[in-house]
Image (cartoon, rainbow, N blue to C red):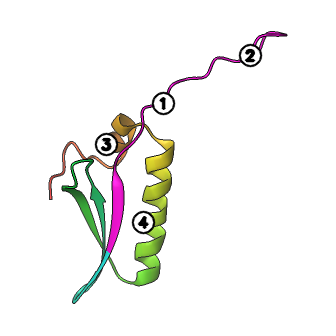
């Protein structure tokens, strides 16, 4: 930062992916939803605690990462469930 001049702020694209937890007959699932609402990724979990922990991590990544980096990290361009 130069004295008297504010730092330039970088524009970060908004990530419109969302995460959803589901409790079904066979246990818990965490789904990553595309901006369109379509399921992009599903992970089965052995317990509610595991599902909530994974979902929380995904939510943090949605907030921190650009859509392109998020898709790369979760390999969403390769996965279609």
- Label 2 or label 4, whichever lies nearer to me, is 2
Alpha-carbon span between mark 4 and mark 3: 16 Å
Alpha-carbon span between mark 3 and mark 2: 32 Å
Task: Residue 37 in the image: state x and y as whole percent.
Answer: 22, 55
Alpha-carbon span between mark 3 and mark 1: 15 Å
Q: Residues within 10 Å of mark 4 (few under 14, many from 20)?
A: many
Q: Secondary structure at mark 3?
A: helix
Q: Residues within 10 Å of mark 2 (few under 14, many from 20)?
A: few
- Label 3 or label 2, whichever lies nearer to me, is 2
Look at the picture and state if 59 lies above or below 35: below
Which segment did they paint magenta?
Answer: 1-21
Dot 1 or dot 2: first in sequence order is 2
Q: Which residue is mark 4?
A: 55
Dot 4 or dot 1: first in sequence order is 1
Q: Which residue is mark 2?
A: 6
Alpha-carbon span between mark 2 and mark 4: 37 Å
Task: Residue 75 in the image: state x and y as whole percent.
Answer: 27, 46
Dot 3 or dot 2: first in sequence order is 2
């Amino acid at each position: 930062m130069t004295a008297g001049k504010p730092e330039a702020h970088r524009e970060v694209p908004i990530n419109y992916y969302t995460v959803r937890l589901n409790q079904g007959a066979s246990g818990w699932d965490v789904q990553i939803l595309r901006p369109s609402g379509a399921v992009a990724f599903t992970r089965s979990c052995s317990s509610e605690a595991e599902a909530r922990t994974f979902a929380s991590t995904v939510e943090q990544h949605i907030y921190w990462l650009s859509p392109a980096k998020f898709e790369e990290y979760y390999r969403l361009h390769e996965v279609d469930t």
